[in-house]
Amino acid sequence: MNSRSGRESFGLLGLRDLPDELETGPGDAGADPRPHGWRQILGWSGSSAPVAVLLLAGIGLGPRGINLLSPVMPLLDPSVPVALAALGVLVGLGLGDRRTDERRLFFAAGLHSLVIMLVVSGGVAAVAMTVTPLEPPMFWTVILVCGICAATSLTLPSGDPLEPRTPVRRLQELGVLLPILAGGLALAWIRAGTPLAALTLIAQASGVTIMLALAAWLLLGRASSETEERVFAVSALLLVSGVADALSLSALLGGLIAGVFWRFAGRQPRETIRRDVLFVQHPLLVLVLLLAGARAELSSASLLLGAGYLGARLIAQLAGCALTHRVAGASTPGELRLHLLPPGVFGVAFALNAVSVLGAEASIAHAAVVAGTIGSELVAVVMRTRRRG
């Protein structure tokens, strides 16, 4: 791996100052011109964003800060499912890499996510039972949402299956699949009341989503100009997110289903949708993070749960990365936990989705996830800085 491709592939989650031996190689140590230390938390790139900074900005601008966003929050709420569906579409478009080690990485990523979900759910449950007792319905919602949110480490998916990516990058992209599926099932279960009703509801929504994706694919294949293609692509995204919002289901899961369909459909419609979704991904990401911060109802109980979320996630990363090394083999770097420690944006996105669907029942879980995400980002910066030192 040359110096340039190594820097681009490992420019993840706003934390781009890797150890020299992982990023530039032995011959290029010290050649990386990008900022290190605490300046990296402000970094933007094609695959990273200042997650903690935007969440803190949302908290400061929201109702518990200077109250600047409060008048426009009701106007921005309808755009949240669109932003979440766009993130799911990008994940779906990035699937289908047929490299020889893809199956091993897929299994390793799923195992890592499962370990994180179980350990964090258990840790948050222990805190909820001993420090901040919750009523049974909210208790189960909190541990489910926190466990699912903690299992991701990806900020911005590439959406391009042909783009060269490192094993760490593939682990991050594949690692969001299980949390998105589990999150969609959890929201449907809470809304429908029984597992069978939840599966029926998801099957119906998936069928409608696939039909809409098929219609968009047919229209895009007959578009006569780039402007017409962009109109069809944006309309398809709005329809996919509208289905999830109307049924009070996971917009991330709806976007993932549509993205997988378009990934294996014709090349021209797929590339059109990928281009147009990538074009708006940064504004949508900023919207999600600012609204997530503004909607966080921080309290002593949510901060305690956030501390439990952070501590359990740190412990889970040690166990999960050890298992990942065993499954994925020598293709993963020794400092894998430094890459997977920042939770990225998908956890926050799912927490915001849960608040939109479940309302006050998920508010404390959402606030705990926001606090835990900020803490995880800061801990990752400290660990990276100490590692370089």
Image: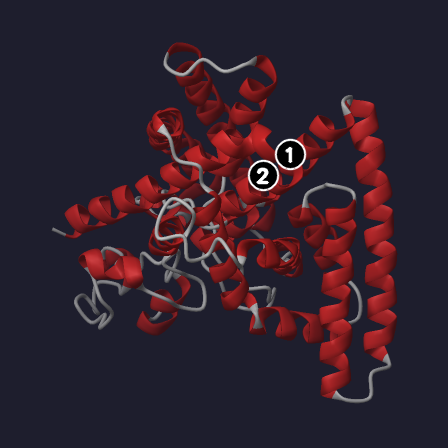
Please name whichever residue, 192 or 176, is drawn nearer the observer in this view of the structure. Answer: 192
Query: x, y percentage for residue 221?
Result: 84, 78
The figure's colour scheme reads secondary structure
Please name whichever residue, 192 or 11, is drawn nearer the observer in this view of the structure. Answer: 192
The kind of residue tagged 2 is: Val
> Extreme bottom residue here?
225
Please name whichever residue, 262 or 245, is drawn nearer the observer in this view of the structure. Answer: 245
Question: Which image quadrant for residue 237?
Answer: bottom right
* Residue 6 placement, left or right of 232: left
The kind of residue tagged 1 is: Leu
Residue occupying image coordinates x 72% and y 85%: 227
Question: Which image quadrant for residue 17?
Answer: bottom left
Query: x, y percentage for residue 354?
Result: 60, 38
* Residue 36 placement, left or right of 14: left
Residue occupying image coordinates x 73% and y 41%: 248
Residue 20 visible within the image: yes
Query: x, y percentage for residue 36?
Result: 20, 61
Query: Whole-Å distance between the Cαs marked 1 and 2?
Result: 5 Å
Q: How many marks?
A: 2
Task: Decide: few, some or many residues near mark 1? Use Cα within 10 Å; few <14, some 14-19, many ≥20.
Answer: some
- Tell me the element at label 2: helix
* Residue 382 placement, left or right of 286: left
Against 36, residue 154 (above or below) is above
Against 110, residue 41 (above or below) is below
Name the mark on residue 278.
Answer: none
CB atoms of marks 1 and 2 within 8 Å: yes
Q: Which residue is mark 2?
A: 355
Q: Quadrant of the N terminus?
A: bottom left
Q: Which residue is mark 1?
A: 358
